[in-house]
Each structure stands twice: as structure tokens, then as C-alpha cells.
Amino acid sequence: MSLKLIYHFQTSQNQDQEFRPASYAVIYFFSDDGFLDERQLRELAKAIPNADHEGLTFLNLDDLKSFAARVGEELAVREVRLISVQDYNIGIDGAKDLATFTGVFEKYGEIVVNETVKKKGLFGKFFT
């Protein structure tokens, strides 16, 4: 199973006399089987300090990556691929077929590797 996360970057701004810091909001988080459970994602986001776990919003890209790695760890998935909405849109604009469309995450996305899930070697496949 592979995990993919699409996020939106919002720059810092002043709105209604209130300063809002830059943020990274999770737009979609899904696997080959469909969207991940939002309740579970909110629970896992609580492990990231200063995150808005209800809105799945993070103050910086490192926190978003930590969250993605935490979800990968929880679901025993080695890699999570992250891509911004802007990069995703650029990728799908050029997609001409299904193979190109599915390659958008590989071409434009960033990989977060979960070190706690080890790839099985040749002997590991035989003995499990």
C-alpha cells in the first residue's frame, strides 16, 4: 500500500486586524484503497506540537512531514508521498494518460520515509 498526501500552503497574512502565520493544510490523504479516516488523522496530528489537529493544519513543512511519517508508522507503510496543490495541478495539466497521471506524485512530490517499517529482504520474504 502507498500513501499520498496533497497539501495547501497558505502564506502568512493580516486579516481583519489579526495576523495569521503561514500554514500547511492537509487537503487529501489517501491510499490505494481510498481516503484515510479523518478521525484517526486528527488523533495522530495531536502528537505534533502547535498543530491544529481539528483542521489538520501545521505551522511548517517539517511538522507536516513528521505528521505524514507518523501516519505511515501507524499504518505500517514505508513511504508517504507529499505534494502541494500547486505542484499537483502542474503535473495533472501535462498528464496525457493514466500512467502519466499516476506518476505525478513520483515526478513532483516529496518522499517521507518511515524508518520503522523495514523492507523485507529475500530471506525475510521466505521466513515470514
Image (cartoon, helix red, strand yellow):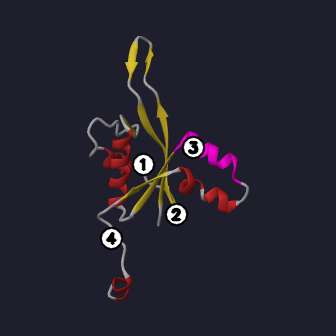
Name the quarter where the C terminus is drawn. bottom left
Give the label on residue 38, or none: 1
Question: Compared with residue 83, is residue 101 higher up or lower down, i.e. above or below?
Answer: below
Q: Is residue 99 above or below residue 25?
A: below
Residue 97 vs residue 58: left or right?
Answer: right
Label 3 to label 1, Cα distance in Å?
A: 23 Å
Q: Identity of the amino acid at label 4?
A: Lys
Say what amino acid the circle numbered 3 marks. Asp
Q: Residue at x 42, y 48 (%)?
A: 38
**Which amino acid, by three-letter code, is at mark 2?**
Asp
Position of residue 7 measured from the top left corner of the image (x, y, whole percent):
48, 42
Instruction: Give the residue number, with chain letter if any, for mark 4.
Output: 118
Residue 123, picture quadrant: bottom left
Q: Which numbered circle lies on residue 1?
A: none
Q: Nearer the viewer, mark 4 or mark 1?
A: 4
Mark 1: few/some/many CA within 10 Å (<14, 14-19, 20+): some
Q: Residue at x 38, y 18 (%)?
A: 19
Residue range (magenta): 84-95
Query: Magenta span has 34?
Result: no
Q: In the image, residue 88 lies at what x, y percent?
A: 58, 46
